[in-house]
Amino acid sequence: MFDAASSHGQTRRPLPPAQPPADGVPTPRTPVSARGDRKGRTAPDRPGRQRDAFFDNAKYLAIVLVAMGHSWEPLKGDSRILEAAYTVVYSFHMPAFILISGFFSRNFDMRPDRLKRLITGVVVPYVLFETAYPLFKNLVTGSHEEISLLDPWYLTWFLVALFVWRLTTPIWRLVRWPLPLALGIAMLATVSPNIGDDLDLQRVLQFLPYFVLGLCMKPEHFQLVRRRWVRVAAVPVFAVALAVGWWAVPRMNTAWFYHRDSAQELGAPWWCGPVMTLAMMGCSLLLTACFFAWVPRRHMWFTTLGAGTLYGYLLHGFLVKFGDYRGWFEHPWLHRPLGEILVTVLAAGAVTVLCTGPVRRVFRFAMEPRMEWAFRRDAAQSARERQQPRQERREKVGV
């Protein structure tokens, strides 16, 4: 596909501004070199960019785990093994996704074009889906749920958190010890029941260290967990984690993994909050490293779906809730091993479909609206667009 003039020597027009990534996580890209020949094909000496398959694979696999976990919630009470798997998955799937979000937010600043992408790619989807979820429940169940932008519904808390985390990125890049500071804030949140439920601030603050850790990471850190010996070690680590999860099912409140309540609200002494924050972060990071170790590095059949994870994340909630409202999960056969396997496969398949191109095109108005009418023209962006054709003409003549 051409992104400039054809081989007839026409003056190339500037490309339109890039759209924000659909999942709120900036697109991971790896520089390559390419120069177009007379037929528009690429050769190795012209600068170009391509997506990093590793991160797209990680995002897709993480969102599949999210959907599977949500499908297990109505079933796990009847199966200790399923609840153990649920506990293990919940201990790392969101930390992994948040860590990637932080890693690709490292360069976020208050530049107008980046603020615009934050609004169109995070704030607008939040408002739309925060409105759509209660309306959907009212339609299906005949209830009269109120719409409130201050009380995130089901999955929309992540959009609130991502907005707050990304806005504060310049602060975390400025302070000397960002991760200890973020950990301190998370531990204080666990002993502060008065924070309340507005904007799910408990989750925003308790998950904050994972985002800040992502901000502090460098590409070579991801290379460390992709070594062969780490992949081998990940197998017994996950086996032990499942065994510990099975042991902990009757002994531990799984609400700790949601990070939405203080220690007092969970019926524990206040000092358990900071202790559990540190213990759970250690376990989460260990399992996240094992998860990254097994994420494929090459292009897979599902790699392109990694660009649509926000679609799968927000849309699969309607399917899960519809099944819940209709009582489908109460069918006795689904509470047996084969039924649990079927629900798991259906959840993975559904979220996969929701990440595909056709679905993204249909719902792009809600996830990636352009909204040029709502923003003033950025003078700096205009200058960059005017400069682009001049730079391309210089490259063409070898200047």
Image (spheres, rainbow, N blue to C red):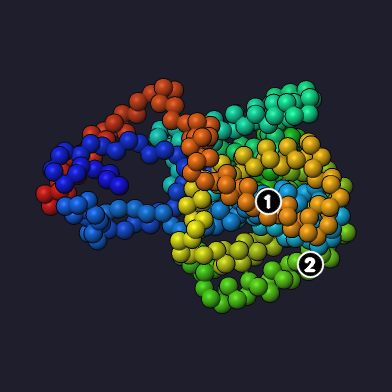
- Foreground pick, 130 / 182: 130
Estimate the x, y position of residue 351 in percent, counting from the top left: 61, 47
Q: Residues within 10 Å of mark 2 (few under 14, many from 20)?
A: some
- Foreground pick, 78 / 371: 78
Q: Quadrant of residue 164?
A: top right
Estimate the x, y position of residue 292 in percent, counting from the top left: 57, 63
**Alpha carbon of mark 1 to alpha carbon of mark 2: how far?**
27 Å
Say whether residue 382 is left or right of residue 174.
Answer: left
Estimate the x, y position of residue 257 in percent, counting from the top left: 74, 52
Q: Residue at x 73, y 26 (%)?
A: 139
Q: Residues within 10 Å of mark 1 (few under 14, many from 20)?
A: some
**Res. 244 mark:** 2
Sequence-earlier tag: 1 or 2:
2
Estimate the x, y position of residue 387 in percent, counting from the top left: 22, 37
Q: Residue at x 26, y 37 (%)?
A: 14
Asked if one can make out residue 87 in the rendered structure from this viewpoint, the answer is no
What's the residue type where badge 1 is placed?
A: Leu
Q: What residue would you read off at disc 1?
A: 346
Asked if one can make out residue 223 in the rendered structure from this viewpoint, the answer is yes
**Res. 29 mark:** none
SS of the residue under disc 2? helix
What's the residue type where badge 2 is placed?
A: Val
- Foreground pick, 224 / 136: 136
Q: Residue at x 54, y 57 (%)?
A: 58
How many badges with numbers are in the image?
2
As drawn, 274 above or below 265 = below
